[in-house]
Amino acid sequence: MMKSKWLWALLVVLLGVGLAAGSVLATPPSGQTTSTVARSSFDSLSLHSHVAHVWKAKMKTRGLSDFYVIDNHFAPGGTSGWHSHPGPSLIFVVAGTVTNYLGDDPQCRPHVYTAGQGFVDDGSHPHTLRNEGSVTAETVAVQFLPAGATRRNDEPDPGNCNF
C-alpha cells in the first residue's frame, strides 16, 4: 500500500516536471504584436467556384469551423517564436519583409516574403516567422481551424536552425 502511494507521488512529480519543461522549452514571440481583426464560426462548408475553364476553387469542411483574421506586426529582429496551428493559414505580407523557417526542414532554408507577397502555412508542422530587416514588418493571416481549437500552439525549438 505504501509502495503504491510512492509510485503515484512519483508519477505526479514526473508529470509536473514534464509540463514545466514543455513550457520552458517553448519559444514564445519576441518583438511581435498580434491582434484579432475578426473571428467567426461557420457550419460545414462545401464551396465550388469556377470561371469558364480558366480558374477553379474548392473548399470543404466537416463540422463547425472557426475562421480568424489576424494582424501581426514584427519589429526589426522580432520573431513569432516556433509555433504551429491546428489548420491552414493564408498569410499576406502587407509591409516590410518576413522570413519563414520550417521546423521540418533539416537545412533550415529561409523563405523570404516581401510586401505584396503571400504564402500558405498548411498547419502540419512548426514554423517561425522572423523580421530580419530594418523596418517593421506586418502580416495579415486568414486561419481556418476546427471549432474551439487553440489558434496558436507554442512549440519547442526543433534544433534545425542556428539563431
Image (cartoon, grey):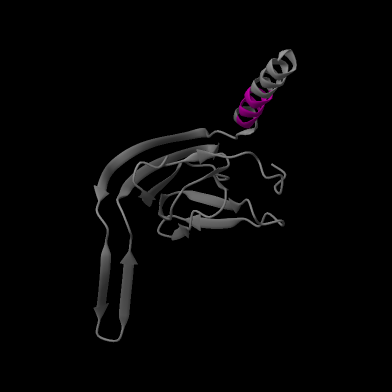
Which residue of the protein is positioned furthest toward the front in this rendering?
A: 1
- Comparing 2 with 42, the one in front is 2
**Residue occupying the point 32% across, 66% down:** 59
Q: Main secondary structure of the magenta part?
A: helix
Picture quadrant of residue 39: top left
Q: Name the spot of residue 30 as percent of width and height, x first.
A: 54, 32
Q: Name the spot of residue 46 as percent of width and height, x first.
A: 27, 66
For residue 102, above or below residue 82: below
Q: Is residue 19 magenta?
A: yes
Picture quadrant of residue 112: bottom right
Which residue of the protein is positioned furthest toward the top in this rendering?
A: 2
- Comparing 95 with 27, the one in front is 27
Q: Is residue 138 magenta?
A: no
Q: Which residues are magenta?
A: 14-22
Q: Name the spot of residue 121 as percent of width and height, x first.
A: 48, 56
**Residue occupying the point 37% across, 49% down:** 146
Which residue of the protein is positioned furthest toward the right in this rendering?
A: 3
* Image quarter (top left, top right, bottom left or bottom right) of the C terminus: top right
Whether residue 142 can be seen here: no
